[in-house]
């Protein structure tokens, strides 16, 4: 490796139901606001109306998928936040690593309906997908010449994209990487998650005794990861550091987590080992906490085992489950919480479940310590964990 | 075709239990775990199949758990729901 | 960091396994068959390279495959064959990482999920189809069947999926996160991909791909899976080394400079525009070869190119280019002996991916 751990984070960008930029999101989180509602941008013939967390006050251009437009929006904020301009970026080898579940799937319902009805539908919906690879869209917009990678690891994609981006910096492949995730709400994931019977028809309640499942959300989170050489050259302060990344597969089941959380334990151990971070120095854990019965049980038990007494929370009560964007949005929130020294209450939680490993933080809470963990558990048994915080605090 | 035979045909065809014939399925054998070896993903698929073939909505898995114990149990559940409709 | 290709598992129009792939490369004969595509004017036959997966039942009980779709089956078969070829089948795979690259994912199952909604309404959406249409389903199925508990990654970067994913796979090995990576590329034929192909190229169908003939479109759609078992350089029992992986976009008008003496393995696949781009991007007098007429046109073909390169380096000899008679790229040299191969994929306006291989 040409670049040691940790890897500096110099910019953040975020858009989701909680707000269209990082500050607005944090304000909503700290004030406990959330407003899940019936989908407004699509209809469903499903008899039950399931609430979702839509991004309001944002519209995508005709030529792009909403997912990629959301990603671009967050990338623009992150690039500005890092104090980067076109001039500076031109001389650097910049990569883009973005997680998603929706974009890049050849999945346009109207096109398929028309095709199945025996028509020769207009190809524009397909061409839009082909133009909208979320990593390529960002590279194209800014004229980046480095590698592009769209990570499609289901609900862990955003976390993996950030972790992989760090390895690109560490391997000397890139000077700077725009890393994150993006996903839009749509009928396909809406119906898909309802069909799996892990969707709550009321606002989601992560880690609560009465949790019934997740609510879907949409949005994007982006982080700027930067090599020490470039940061020194342009004399740029780091907002935080990526102190570790771990991922492991349960190799258990396509849709159910391993009951003993073995994969998650491996992933956490690997993330802690990168900088030799001790479990006791973790200030808080930003959990995956989707609000599904299985996820929250497995995850809380692992947390109780490995991080007894360390506060944890889920921010999905504010954003919904944004799938491929979730890990990235939560990485942004984790850094923003470390910067502000306060974590928000875990929205939706009211009643402790004796079957779980513990209860999440209920109110805005001051934190001690400068390192935090953000985790994602996904379809296919992917478990991914990143460790964020101050260099040397490990 | 009675409900039980229809159910067995659905199990074999729609859950791709290719090595079985509908006749080979024991009416009382557990559908999940040891019996037919179905799992949680089959369970939610079965909810959709019951909806599709019998027009009956199973709203949550609490309800499904009792109904899905065996072909006999599911047939009785479906018959009960159809009679109540 | 250099890594080695220790095993190859390939499933495609040419057959199944590294022996079939080598035999097809040797003979220069691709096995083009047909697929039927439902279209507005009725069913259409279009030429295609199709893959069979029956041999998978030699590796796993049929029962375990009941929910596995064709896309994942190709991936699983490629995975088992690569492990077998690399001598790791049956070993402890708990520190094996799995990386899958796919241009389009499980398009047939994606479509089947939509069909469940279109046919019977939203309440009849099929959870099984939904779960299997998620892009990482093949990687998950592979990890589950093999008990591979290392990290798992699926990348979908259209035509750049393979070089992009390979970059991360190499980092895993370099960072010692895993002992080996099972790296594979999968793309499949489906009603949707066949129909889109038909919409793009119409009813004029070629019999064979003439990749170096930029005067006409001769592309034929393919499907398959190409898997590579990758390890750190630990012994001499491997096909070749991967020296370098480079991907991104080339500045307008800039030539690609291949490593010294490397045989350039072109990803040209009969798309006229793409052929023209290769002609404009590679230096005059480059030493080139191209084997897409053996496996067809698809994003995953980039991994077949790497597998072909590995076989070339094992022998030290290139295979003749199939259909080279139609070459109108002046000044290209087709060498026989070589110790370096660079598999070059171009796409879009200026995207490129280059994987440099050398003889052990």
Image (spheres, rainbow, N blue to C red):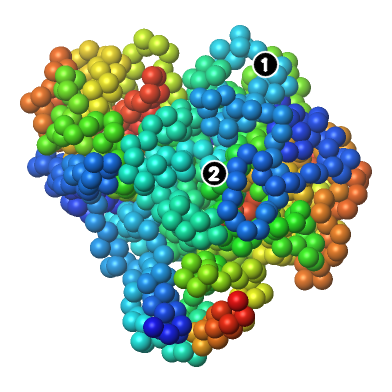
Q: Quadrant of residue A228?
A: top right
Residue at mark 2 to residue at mark 1: CA–CA distance: 29 Å
**Image position of C60 with respect to C249: above or below:** below
**Marker disc for residue A145:** none
> In screen coordinates, is B79 left or right of A389?
left
Residue B45 sits above or below residue A159 on the image: below
Which residue appears farthest toward the left when viewing the image? C325
Residue A22: where, in percent of width, then height? 76, 31
Q: Is residue C290 something that shows in the picture?
A: no
Identified at 71% across, 44% down, the residue is: A53
Q: Quadrant of the C terminus of chain A?
A: top right
Quarter holding residue C47: top left
Mark 2: which secondary structure?
loop
Count residues near mark 1 (Cα–Cα under 10 Å), then give few for <14, some for 14-19, many for 20+: some
Q: Which image quadrant: the N terminus of chain A?
A: top right
Q: Position of residue C215 (x, y in %)?
A: 16, 19
Q: Residues within 10 Å of mark 2 (few under 14, many from 20)?
A: many
* Relative depth, front residue between A43 and A298: A43
Q: Which residue is mark 2?
A: A101
């Amino acid at each position: 490796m040409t670049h040691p751990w940790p890897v500096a984070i110099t910019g953040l960008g975020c858009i989701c139901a909680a707000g269209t930029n990082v500050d607005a999101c944090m304000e909503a989180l700290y004030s406990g606001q959330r407003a899940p509602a019936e989908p407004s941008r699509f209809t469903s013939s499903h008899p039950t109306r399931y609430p979702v967390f839509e991004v309001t006050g944002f519209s995508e251009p005709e030529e792009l998928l909403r997912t990629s437009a959301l990603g671009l929006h967050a990338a623009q904020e992150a690039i500005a936040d890092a104090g980067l301009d076109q001039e500076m970026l031109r001389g650097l080898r910049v990569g883009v690593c973005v997680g998603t579940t929706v974009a890049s799937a050849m999945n346009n319902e109207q096109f398929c309906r028309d095709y199945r009805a025996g028509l020769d539908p207009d190809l524009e919906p397909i061409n839009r997908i082909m133009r909208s690879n979320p990593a390529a869209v960002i590279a194209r917009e800014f004229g980046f010449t480095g590698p592009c990678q769209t990570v499609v690891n289901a609900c862990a994609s955003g976390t993996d994209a950030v972790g992989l981006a760090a390895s690109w910096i560490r391997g000397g492949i890139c000077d700077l990487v725009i890393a994150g995730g993006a996903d839009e709400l749509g009928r396909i994931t809406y119906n898909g998650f309802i069909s799996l019977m892990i969707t709550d028809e009321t606002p989601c309640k992560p880690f609560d005794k009465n949790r019934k499942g997740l609510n879907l959300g949409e949005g994007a989170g982006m982080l700027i990861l930067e090599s020490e050489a470039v940061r020194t050259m342009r004399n740029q302060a780091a907002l935080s550091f990526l102190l570790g990344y771990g991922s492991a597969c349960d190799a258990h089941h396509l849709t159910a987590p391993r009951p003993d959380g073995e994969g998650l334990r491996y992933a956490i151990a690997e993330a802690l080992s990168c900088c030799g971070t001790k479990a006791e120095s973790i200030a808080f854990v930003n959990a995956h906490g989707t609000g599904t019965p299985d996820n929250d049980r497995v995850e809380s038990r692992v947390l109780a085992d490995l991080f007894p007494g360390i506060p944890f929370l889920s921010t999905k009560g504010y954003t919904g489950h944004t799938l491929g964007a979730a890990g990235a949005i939560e990485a942004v929130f984790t850094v923003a919480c470390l910067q502000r020294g306060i974590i928000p209450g875990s929205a939706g939680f009211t009643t402790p479940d004796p079957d779980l490993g513990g209860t999440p933080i209920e109110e805005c809470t001051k934190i001690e310590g400068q390192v935090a963990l953000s985790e994602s558990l996904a379809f296919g048994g992917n478990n991914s964990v990143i460790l964020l915080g101050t260099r040397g605090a490990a | 075709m009675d409900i039980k035979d229809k159910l067995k045909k659905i199990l074999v065809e729609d859950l791709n239990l290719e090595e079985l014939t509908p006749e080979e399925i024991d009416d009382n054998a557990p559908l999940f775990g040891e019996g037919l070896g179905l799992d949680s993903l089959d369970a939610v698929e079965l909810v959709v199949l019951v909806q599709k073939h019998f027009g009956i909505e199973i709203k949550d898995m609490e309800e499904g758990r009792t109904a899905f114990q065996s072909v006999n149990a599911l047939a009785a559940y479906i018959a009960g729901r159809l009679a109540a409709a | 960091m250099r890594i080695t290709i220790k095993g190859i598992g390939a499933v495609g129009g040419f057959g199944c396994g590294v022996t079939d792939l080598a035999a097809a490369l040797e003979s220069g004969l691709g096995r083009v068959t047909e697929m039927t595509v439902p279209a507005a004017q009725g069913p259409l036959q279009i030429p295609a390279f199709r893959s069979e997966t029956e041999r998978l039942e030699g590796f796993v009980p049929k029962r375990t495959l009941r929910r596995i779709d064709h896309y994942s089956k190709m991936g699983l078969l490629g995975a088992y064959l690569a492990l077998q070829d690399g001598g790791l089948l049956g070993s402890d795979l708990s520190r094996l990482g799995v990386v899958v690259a796919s241009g389009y994912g499980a398009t047939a199952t994606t479509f089947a999920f939509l069909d469940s909604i279109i046919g019977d309404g939203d309440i009849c959406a099929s959870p099984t189809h939904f779960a299997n249409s998620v892009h990482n389903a093949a990687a998950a199925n592979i990890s589950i069947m093999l008990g591979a508990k290392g990290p798992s990654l699926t990348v979908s970067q259209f035509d750049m999926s393979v070089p992009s994913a390979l970059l991360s796979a190499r980092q895993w090995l370099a960072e010692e996160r895993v002992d080996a990576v099972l790296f594979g590329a999968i793309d499949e034929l489906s009603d949707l991909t066949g129909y889109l192909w038909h919409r793009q190229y119409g009813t004029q169908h070629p019999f064979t791909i003439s990749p170096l003939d930029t005067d006409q479109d001769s592309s034929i759609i393919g499907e398959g899976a190409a898997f590579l078992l990758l390890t750190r350089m630990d012994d001499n029992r491997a096909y070749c080394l991967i020296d370098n992986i480079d991907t991104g976009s080339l500045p307008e008008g800039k030539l690609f400079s291949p490593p010294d003496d490397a045989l350039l393995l072109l990803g040209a696949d009969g798309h006229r525009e793409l052929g023209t781009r290769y002609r404009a991007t590679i230096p005059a007098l480059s030493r080139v070869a191209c084997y897409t007429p053996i496996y067809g046109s698809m994003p995953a073909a980039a991994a077949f190119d790497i597998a072909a390169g590995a076989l070339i380096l094992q022998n030290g000899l290139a295979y003749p280019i199939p259909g080279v008679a139609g070459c109108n790229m002046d000044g290209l040299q087709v060498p026989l002996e070589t110790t370096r191969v660079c598999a070059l994929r171009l796409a879009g306006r200026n995207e490129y991916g280059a994987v440099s291989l050398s003889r052990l």
